[in-house]
Amino acid sequence: MTEQLKLSIKNLNVFYGDKQALYNINLNIMEKEVTSLIGPSGCGKSTLLKCINRMNDLVEICKTDGQVLLDSKDINDASQDPVLLRMKVGMVFQKPNPFPKSIYDNVAFGPTLHGMTNSKEELDHVVIESLSKSGLYDEVKDRLFDPGTGLSGGQQQRLCIARALAVNPEILLMDEPCSALDPIATAKIEDLIAELKEQYTIVIVTHSMQQAARVSDRTAYMHMGELIESGLTKTIFSNPQHQKTQDYITGRIG
């Protein structure tokens, strides 16, 4: 399969007020692959992730310069609608955050809001398909109208993934999606990531190097707001080019 470039980040700098959070980031993200962002806490992984769907727009003191190109178009261009961008680039957060609504209404929320379906049947189909893709449908099919908040932590996280998938995104951003979950729920999410990458481009922030090694095709190592090294995951873990990457992977820094 030929690799296709989905996202290209060029000379990206991010400032919160007068504090610089990211320094001159250059990173290519390939289509239908999983790219992991790893590095010590506070190194800028989540900040970088939020630049990909312009979540940083919501932070008044945040300023960015540089480019984030999605299919060769700059997402920060004045002509780009951030609402449409966030449909294309879905996000799953560290802590599962289902809406205080039924399981069905959680998944139906986006398609309804954006007028994506023309009938109840179409909406039903989207909800069932999204729950199936997130591996949750068989577990909840008899209680779709029960509150989403009544599910276990791992199920809530898969509900949030279903909610993100319901608006038909091209990219799925995951910010430490397993850090609040137990090992069994984590394994389910990791299996799900392997399935989803056949259809979606996935960028995951993880504090677990083992997880990055298990789920990702490529890995980018960040340190103090800089991108130190990126490449194929197996190369980054077995033969890193940079001493800082080596130190992090062997546990000397972290």
Image (cartoon, helix red, strand yellow):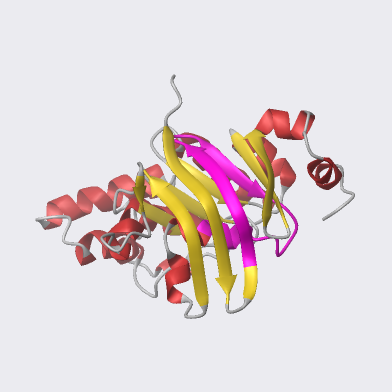
| Image quarter (top left, top right, bottom left or bottom right) of the C terminus | bottom right
Above/below status of 227 relative to 44:
above
Task: Identify the image quadrant of residue 132.
Answer: top left
- Residue found 48% across the figure and 44% down from its top: 202
Where residue 234 appears, as percent x and y from the top left, is: 69, 29
- Residue 216 in the figure: left or right of residue 151: right
- Residue 126 in the figure: left or right of residue 71: left
- Residue found 54% across the figure and 56% down from its top: 12
- Residue found 78% across the figure and 29% down from its top: 238
Residue 156 showing in the rendered view: no
Where residue 153 appears, as percent x and y from the top left, is: 56, 62
**Picture mark count:** 0
- Residue found 58% across the figure and 70% down from its top: 15
Q: Furthest-top residue in view? A: 1
| Image quarter (top left, top right, bottom left or bottom right) of the N terminus | top left
Depth check, front residue: 21 or 254: 21
Above/below status of 2 relative to 51:
above
Residue 26 in magenta stretch: yes
Task: Identify the image quadrant of residue 177.
Answer: bottom right
Task: Identify the image quadrant of residue 250.
Answer: top right
Depth check, front residue: 181 or 76: 76
Depth check, front residue: 227 or 115: 227
Where residue 40 appears, as percent x and y from the top left, is: 75, 57
- Residue 236 in the figure: left or right of residue 137: right
Q: Furthest-right residue in view? A: 252
Where residue 174 appears, as percent x and y from the top left, is: 52, 54
Q: Which segment is the magenta one?
A: 21-49
- Residue 62 in the figure: left or right of residue 100: right
Residue 88 in magenta stretch: no
Q: Furthest-left residue in view? A: 118
Residue 223 showing in the rendered view: yes
